[in-house]
Amino acid sequence: MSNMVTIETPNSQAVLAGQVQDAAKPATQTAGPASQGLQVTERAVKRIRAAIAKEGISPEEGGLRLGVLGGGCSGLSYSIKFDTQPRERDRVYEFDGVRVFVDPKSFLYLHGMTLDYEETLMRQGFNFINPNSTRSCGCGSSFSA
């Protein structure tokens, strides 16, 4: 299932939103096996890298935080924002120099997921391709597992 999501930045500006139907080639992952972790496509890595640089976040210390929050029409919604450093119990993944942080609770819903990015004339943004999602709502921003 694919869902639309908006990235939150420290400056509270919406950076991207969108959805896509198929995933591109995953980027190299250096932490955790792919079947139990998560994947980020090359297109998504490039966009994350550019957005982190624009926000002035150090790629060596900071990264993109992926999470799941309660709420939305289907019960759960995706959370994606920048963070200056990982938290104590985070799983930290690195994809071609871009770090992605996932807290333990969110990992239960995000393991096996692929984060993609699409940029077309009709839409642009990140897309969660999540095998754990059993149903999503009409607005595309929430899901249930």
Image (cartoon, rainbow, N blue to C red):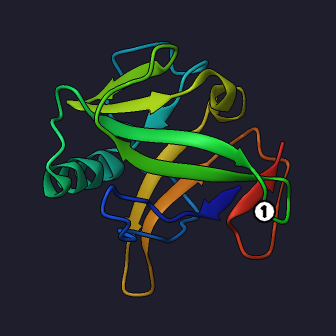
**Badge 1 local density, few (<14 within 10 Å), some, or many (20+)?**
some
Q: SS class of the residue under badge 1?
A: loop
* Viewport quadrant of the N terminus: bottom right
The front one of 15 and 43 is: 15
Left or right: residue 58 versus residue 129 is left
Q: Is residue 8 above or below residue 138?
A: above
Q: Position of residue 75 (x, y in %)?
A: 85, 53
Q: In screen coordinates, is 1 left or right of 136?
A: left
Is residue 47 shown left or right of residue 88? left
Residue drawn 47% across the image and 70% down it? 17
Residue 85 x %, y %: 31, 28
Which residue occupies 44% across, 39% down? 65
Residue 41 location, x and y as percent? 38, 44
111 relative to 16, above or below: above
Q: Residue at x 35, y 68 (%)?
A: 15
The answer to whether 8 is drawn above or below residue 79 in the figure is below
The residue carrying mark 1 is 72
